[in-house]
Image (cartoon, rainbow, N blue to C red):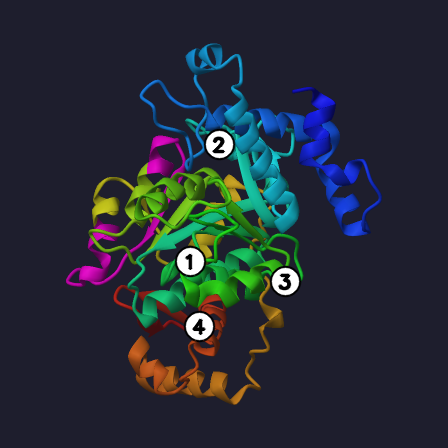
Amino acid sequence: MSIDRIREQLFPFLFEEVDMERQNMAITYGNDREMKALEVLARLCIKKSDGKRRKNTLVQLSETDKEQDERIPDYALSQAERILEQCCREGILVCLKEETNYPPLLSRIALAPEILFYRGTHPGEISTRAALSVVGSRKADRAGRALASQLASLSAAAGAVVVSGLAYGIDAAAHTGALQGGAGSLLPTIAVLGHGLAQPVYPASNRKLANNILEQGGCLLSHFLPDTPAFPSNFLNRNRIVAGLSMVTLIVQATSRSGSLSTARHARDEGREVFVVPGPFDSTLYEGSHELIRQGASLITTPMQLLQELREIYPDVSGSGDISGSQQGLEDVRFRGLYEAFKRSGQLSYEELQNIVSDEEVLGQCLLELELGGFIKRLPGMQFLRTG
């Protein structure tokens, strides 16, 4: 099959008059990139010696594989053509490992994906920014979700890209917080999915959040072929990408069986930093977190400490985390209510604070401002102590 014939079949709009949207797609890929993407995908579709196909997980080929696969069979080339045709048809973009704008930290991990699929802002934009991977339990409680949202919001406001997996619980809270703190910035958050981008977003309850991520300049990213379903094993595989995109992985509320522990393991194996927020010693929601601390992970006890750590690793991170646009302040009756409650009681639990401000998002922002202002200190077990 000739190169011209492949191009004509794969991107027929290059050879005929078509609408502007498809012409733009052709410009986005470019002829040389089309051919390289076709080659990469075809090699990933080649049958292995045991008769199985590389259908779903995209892995880097070894030099032996490349020598054996020097000649690409027609069936693999045809399958690769169908994949790229589908990408063009559904607006799924690709990023090749050999390109200069491939996320640099990800390119350094073992078996970095040869090709990434994405929607939204190019994931390579992360190369000029600080990045923080935030993960934790899917079954997180309200306090854990609020904390993840607060820390992600603060980090995004300080200029960091927040990376997570769009799962229930901590992941969703982290993306939501990043969109709030990074409002108006390019690439406030990257959601790494455990399935192909042609599949409906999983879990279904986070589809609206996924749309919000795209609308606000974020990125949906996958290293799985577009039609790959959300198999359970994919999510553990996805975790190495979450860890690989940043120098720092923050664990918020991990149980002993939390998948976020695998993210921490991947980060540690790649020589990246692992930070952990501690919790009550008798809470099963923090069993995995505390085990990571025993293994040597760094303890994070205040939002300002997180910013200081990020600033040491990424000098461009702002030191204060500008959250002045959060529409909170002493003139806000809810903020004043918390302020007065701390003046009266000195120490309050998160549950007690919810009786004053029931909106979880507003409460998180109020507590964050009080903490950054030095008026309160966060204690283990989601207790808050007045310090000023």
| Residue drawn 23% across the image and 61% down it | 285
Q: Tell me if 292 is positioned left or right of 187 in this view.
A: left
> Which circle's residue, 3 or 2, is located before the other in the chain?
2
Q: Earlier in the sequence, mark 4 or mark 1?
A: 1
Which amino acid does the dot numbered 4 rest on? Gly
Q: Earlier in the sequence, mark 3 or mark 4?
A: 3
Query: Alpha-carbon neighbours of circle 2 within 10 Å: few (<14), some, or many (≥20)?
Result: many
| Amino acid under disc 3 | Glu
Start and end of the magenta stretch? 266-290
Instruction: Determine which residue is flagged by label 2.
Output: 113
Is 385 drawn above or below residue 211 in the view shown?
A: below
> Looking at numbered disc 1 in the image, what kind of residue is underneath it?
Tyr
**Residue at 26% in and 52% down:** 258
Q: Closer to us: mark 4 or mark 1? A: 1
Disc 4: which residue: 364
Whether residues under marks 1 and 3 lie with C-beta atoms below 8 angstroms apart, the answer is no
Residue corresponding to mark 3:
215
In this rendering, the label closer to the viewer, 1 or 3: 1
Circle 3/circle 4 CB separation < 8 Å: no
Q: Are marks 4 and 2 in contact (CB under 8 Å)?
A: no
Q: Earlier in the sequence, mark 4 or mark 2?
A: 2
